Image (spheres, grey):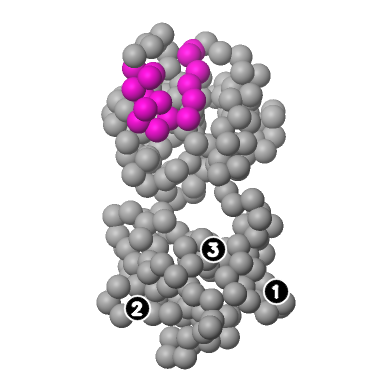
Amino acid sequence: MADVLIIEDDATIRTALVRALSAREHSTMTAPTALDGLQSLVAHPPDVVLLDLGLPDLDGASLLAMIRAVSAVPVIVISARDDGAGIVALLDAGADDYLVKPFAADQLEARIRAVLRRSDSARPAGPLVVGPLVIDARARTAVLDGVPLELSPKEFDLLSYLAERPGEVVGKRELLSKVWNQPYGGADKTVDVHLHWLRRKLGESADEPRLLHRVRGVGVKLVPPP
Ligand code: CA
């Protein structure tokens, strides 16, 4: 089961896709234009995107480039044309797979499952360990010194993002972009507030850090204690 974002301007096809995917226990979001689709993707990050190439406001390649600037979500391109060269260009531009209309619902389901398997295996297989901190991305659990942490979803995402890059200084702009999906900037305060909460849950403070260290003027880094 996946959250599927359908970007398709043809209402008949959209409805048919929603029906087919819902019948297979997926949840769907729909967008009739490229810009609606992009907005939806940022507001509610889906597990997979179905992208119709013929949209009224932007061509598929431009939209794909915009999606790739903000997200690594798997994208399955749906093309009405039998456009070999265009499809190769889109796959090069970061599409994960494609289907040419008309296609059977079972075909679509098989493609969705295939791209989800691939994106799943791109995640770290085992738990992340940074000193006394153990993070299991699949179970979405974090344990510090053997004690489970009670983290909000965003706190968990933030901690995971830093734990995947131990010792690396990560800027607030990068955190806004990758954890909050706000590549065009936003309130730095959001990051500060969440870092503050996260520190409290880790039982430390900015002035007396143990794992989460502030690098003034640059960002933060997560490092195992000595
Ligand atoms: Ca279309």
Distance from Cα at disc 1 to Cα at disc 3:
14 Å
Could you tell me which secondary element the residue under label 3 belongs to?
helix
Residue 115 is left or right of residue 98, and the answer is right
In the displayed structure, would residue 144 be above or below residue 45? below
Q: Quadrant of the N terminus?
A: top right
Kindly identify the residue that appears in the image at 48 percent across and 86 percent down: 209
User: How far is the residue under mark 2 from the one under mark 1?
Assistant: 27 Å
Horizontally, residue 127 falls left or right of residue 197, namely: right
In the image, is the residue at mark 3 within 8 Å of ligand 1 by its beta carbon? no
* Residue assigned mark 3: 160
Provide the residue designation for mark 2.
Answer: 215
Residue 156 shows in the view: yes
Residue 175, image x and y in percent?
A: 39, 63
Q: Which residue is mark 1?
A: 148
Q: Which residues are magenta?
A: 86-101
Residue found 39% across the figure and 80% down from its top: 214
Residue found 37% across the figure and 69% down from its top:
169
Indicate the secondary structure of the residue bearing disc 2.
strand
Q: Along the polypeptide, which appears first: circle 3 or circle 2?
A: 3
